[in-house]
Amino acid sequence: MLDLNLVRVFTAIYETRSVSGAADRLFITQPSASYALARLRHETNDELFKRSRKGMEPTPTAIQLYKVFKKSLTGIEKAVAETRTFSPDTAHHKFRLALSDLGELLLLPRLVTHLRQVAPNIQLEVLPVDMQKLDEWLLTGRIDAAICNRNESVSSAQRELMMYQHYVCLLNNNHPRIGDHLSLDGYMQEQHIVVSASSGHHIVEDRLKEFGLERDIVVEVPHFAALGELIASSELLVTLPFNAARIYVQRGNGRILELPFHVPNPEIFLYAHTEIGDITAKTWFYNVLRQAGPSMIDP
């Protein structure tokens, strides 16, 4: 009979395309994962994975085995999880959540308040979201969940549409050239602040390129945190989601005007692999974010 632990290692290698990634997910050493792979190769009389620039590429035999192993392993783990209970009021558990700094601004304060009320002993670690590494982080279990813009590179994770973002322009309350209406010419004649595209907020730039337009960008910042003070102390414009702009307006850092061109409303998704790791705990955390997240973001 095949050792169930070998099946877990095989599945982790298949999904992460990495022996080290599988080891990280399963909280074992890399030599242990390599040893398990060697045993599997002996048991199946097949190489199972070949090294390539993209990682560990599965052989045809491995592809067939994965279909059977994944279904069986998921069934076993769910059956075991159903015998357990997760009591948030007494549980000591650490969750890792990937957020952009915009997510931290909009979601984090209310999320922490909610968790303190329903699960006072829970630890929450927030990581800056990296859109290029998001799939790897979810598969290896480095994070339990992520809330960010739609990311097509994320494979097979559970996902829940949280909200749509509506982009607006934030500007100084006493801007000398712009009144209560913003024209396209007026928008393009001004100088702008942008948040680095690596954070996933590049839809406005993409839209302007479709019109053959290019803004005069004089400041590029990595995060949203400094935008309020920059707007309050300058004549620069910044284009950002309404929910974030509203916070700065409430702080007295500027005013909001509608954009003079149409920008599609980006989708914000919740991502997680609840079948990886402690299923019961991760499912509870996922449901907390899924059910409470939208109201926390847009109270």
Image (cartoon, helix red, strand yellow):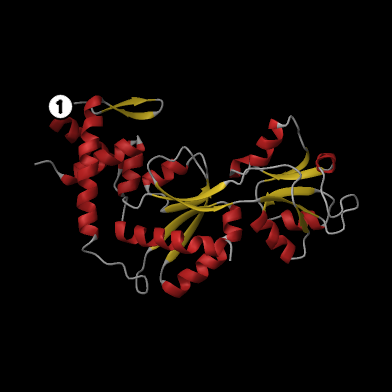
- Decide if residue 93 is in sight here: yes
Three-letter amino acid code at disc 1?
Asn
Q: Position of residue 49 (x, y in %)?
A: 28, 28
Picture coordinates of residue 108, whole percent (x, y): 55, 62
Q: Position of residue 109 (x, y in %)?
A: 56, 66
Foreground of the two, 128 or 185 = 185
Residue at left offset 69%, top offset 42%: 262
Looking at this view, is 91 or 84 the one in front? Answer: 84
Q: Percent from the top left, x then y, of residue 9?
A: 25, 41
Judge from the rendering whether residue 258 lies leftward or rightward of residue 98; answer left or right: right
- The N terminus lies in quadrant: top left
**Viewed as shown, does residue 150 lie left or right of 32?**
right
- Residue plotted at (30% across, 60% down): 280
The residue pinned by badge 1 equals: 45
Q: What is the crowding at mark 1: few (fewer than 14 residues within 10 Å), some, or many (at least 20)? A: few
Circle 1 sits in a helix, a strand or a loop, which is it? loop
Quadrant assignment, res 59: top left
Q: Is residue 36 shown left or right of residue 167?
A: left
Give me the residue at 74% from left, 51% from top.
Answer: 258
User: Is any part of residue 37 visible from this angle?
Assistant: no
